[in-house]
Image (cartoon, rainbow, N blue to C red):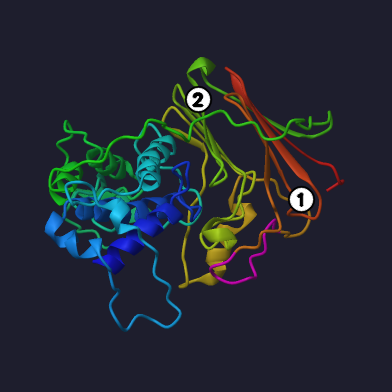
Amino acid sequence: LALAAGEVLAEGVRQVHEDGSGFEGSTAYHRLSLDMLVHTVALLIGIDARRWDPLRGDARLPPGLPTGFVAAETDWAGLLGADGRLQPSPALVERLWRAAGFTRAVTRADGRALLIGDNDSGRFIKPCPRYEVIDAQAARTRFPDRFVEREEGEELRELGEDHTHLVRAIEALFGADDDASIDARLIRWLANGRTLQRPSREGGASPHSGLSAVPAPPDDCNTLELPFPRRIDTAQVQLHAYPGWGLYLLKGDGLLLSLRCGPLGLSGTGNHNHNDQLGLTLHLDGRDWIADPGTYRYTADLAERDAYRSVRAHFAPWLRDGDAEPGSLTEGTWRLGNQARAVLEQATSTRLQGRHRGYGGVVHRRVDLFADRVLIRDWSEDGL
């Protein structure tokens, strides 16, 4: 118990940034790791006080641990409350609550989360997944490798991009009693009726300005204007800034616009990152205008893995000539080069701007949101 609980509590703080975003740089892996964390924390806070009594003294770790393994240092006296039961650290409690906010921020109006980084469909506990019902003939066309019963008129497809179950689970851990979903009921059962106290500070949605002096695009920059079919109420649009991840979102009135600009995940190794620095996604009124295709294969087809990691699979600046990548794809299946060194230059509720050096010179992108359109401008200081 000392080993397992200590590692869970330490890794929870390490793997969730202070702003609530996951340290792997992937919305799908954010879901998977938080799925593990929230259910395990619920189980731990529900454990009877008598089980924790031996840890008040000298909690010895079991023998036979791997050579070189360094167990987390855990202050059990500070984590066990007056009732003798576990109370996670304030840092972990804040991260858990803000992780739900991050998931809400990256979720479109139809309940599906944006695909940023590797798209793993793994789940820790899946009591009640969401499905869409599609016509059997359409299913055979969309999924030619999947068997569909010929006599069946309909086919069910699991919506793996739906992460709302994670929000329900986290909110139940923080005392949401009005949720009768099986996800919330499972958390309440694991926690034995105990809950965590919501932090006073929400975090994760504050306006974030990058540089004090923001470079302006030249008159001859590359420009793309996307007119909207209706006017957007920009007063409803809010900025959701996640600098720990390097993801900035404009969301409101049916709009969800994202800019990727920041560090690589997994302590800089970029295991699950793609070459999407300064890349955009745009969702409006139930339609994807600019979408990230996710991941096609992992080790079963390394060439296709790299094709989907490539800058050319993303709506990001890339050079007209040659096949240059802003981050090296040759450092291994589970690594991405950090040549881009992306820097946020400005983030407001109507403008997102950043730069990177992945092509050897500085490349900028500015995205301006207006009521009737979005304006995208790219330029380089070095003649790229």
Tell me, yes or no, if residue 298 can be seen here: yes
Q: Amino acid at mark 1?
A: Arg
Q: What segment carries the magenta color?
A: 325-335
x and y percentages locating residue 374 in the rendered image: 62, 26
Please name whichever residue, 362 or 344, is drawn nearer the observer in this view of the structure: 344
Q: Which mark is residue 67?
A: none
- Counting residues from the start of the chain, the first of labels 2 and 1 encountered is 2
Q: Is residue 113 left or right of residue 273?
A: left
Q: Is residue 191 magenta?
A: no
Q: Is residue 108 left or right of residue 191?
A: right
Q: Looking at the image, which residue is at 34% across and 44% down? A: 93
Mark 2 sits on what residue?
238
The quarter of the picture where the N terminus appears is bottom left
Mark 1 sits on what residue?
320
Q: Amino acid at mark 2?
A: Gln
Query: Does residue 332 sit above or below 275 in this rendering?
Result: below
Mark 1 is surrounded, within 10 Å at the Cα level, by few (under 14), some (14 to 19) or many (20 or more) other residues, namely few
Please name whichever residue, 179 or 198, is drawn nearer the observer in this view of the structure: 198
To which quarter of the image does residue 65 belong? bottom left
Query: Does residue 246 sit above or below 176 in this rendering?
Result: below
Please name whichever residue, 266 or 108, is drawn nearer the observer in this view of the structure: 266
Q: Main secondary structure of the magenta part?
A: loop
